[in-house]
Amino acid sequence: MTSQTNGSFDRTPLIAGNWKMNMDHVQGIALLQKLAWTLDDAKHDHDRVEVAVFPPFTDLRSVQSLVEADGLRVRYGAQDLSDKDSGAYTGDVSGQFLARLGCTYVLVGHSERRTLHGETDALCAAKIAAAHRHGLVPVLCVGEGLEVRQAGEHVGHTLEQLRGAVAGLDAERVAELVVAYEPVWAIGTGEVAGPEDAQEMAAAIRAELADLHDARTAARTRILYGGSAKAANAAALLKGRDVDGLLVGGASLDAEEFASIARFEQHLVTD
Ligand SMILES: O=C[C@H](O)COP(=O)(O)O
């Protein structure tokens, strides 16, 4: 999970599939099995391009069992966590439980959490701290809505979200952090930010992290793009020097499509 120079990439690319509220645990196991077989058939090199899935909470125990029993190289994480560790918080899920389930990652501040559940930057900062208390790597989601984009304020807006959530982190935490830039207007809409838009924001995020810490630290942070990513546009989106992977929603529910996204290098020559 540590960002490293990897062939033509400055950091190990991460292709992450957020299943959102889809796939019960039986369906989820079938999807993960098919994904693993498809990647195996294609001789996917997991050290070169990391693949992770983010199933619903109720799938995680089954996912853990399958990953352990079959020795799968696909990593997994949760879609959210509580900022608290335990206690009278009905319906919430502690980072401790996620760690015990073998999660590597946890999403923090997905736009659907921010808009549907009123999550603030301060809460995201607290959730990142909770993730760290339990050895989980947070994937912090940031990004602007359509009105902000149309007003030309998308960079300032997104960097404010970033600062609000990561300001207190030390350099090692910033280096291992994953940031996912997800323009809200491109999520589940079929509207894709262009590769130049993805690179513009990824570069701005990296520059901001360098300002908050130092350039060497920021050079290790992985920055993903998310929003209607699919096999047909993955290679183009990943051409940007600062774009280190994709956070995929809808297209991650189809094992072959998602595997094809993870195999984006196959498409580079034909673009
Ligand atoms: O977490 C994933 C993003 O919200 C993107 O979703 P999408 O690929 O369905 O647009």
Image (cartoon, rainbow, N blue to C red):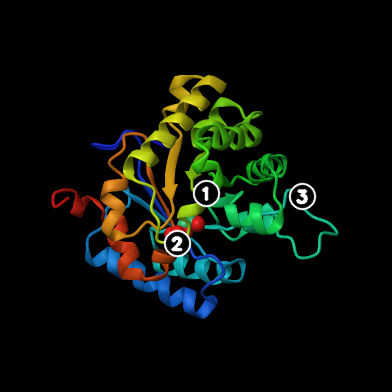
Residue 1 at least partly seen: no
Looking at the picture, tell me which residue is in the foreground, 69 or 36. 36
> Callout 3, which amino acid?
Lys
Q: Circle 1 sits on which residue?
A: 146
The image shows residue 7 at horizontal and vertical percentages of 24, 37
Q: Residues within 10 Å of mark 3 (few under 14, many from 20)?
A: some
Kindly identify the residue that appears in the image at 61 percent across and 33 percent down: 160
Instruction: Identify residue type, mark 1.
Output: Leu
Image vertical order of residue 100 relative to residue 5, above or below: below
Tell me, yes or no, whether the two marked residues, 2 and 1, touch with CB atoms within 8 Å: no
Element at badge 2?
A: loop
Name the residue beneath numbered marker 2. 189
Q: Earlier in the sequence, mark 2 or mark 3?
A: 3
Label 2 and label 3: CA atoms lie apart by: 33 Å
Residue type beneath disc 2: Thr
| Cα–Cα span, label 1 and label 3 | 32 Å
Query: Is ligand 1 less than 8 Å from the beta carbon at label 2?
Result: yes
Asked if residue 9 is positioned above or below residue 21 in the image, the reply reads above
**Nearer to us in this view, 29 or 109:** 109
- The mark lying in front, picked from 2 and 3, is 2
Q: Is residue 38 left or right of residue 104?
A: left
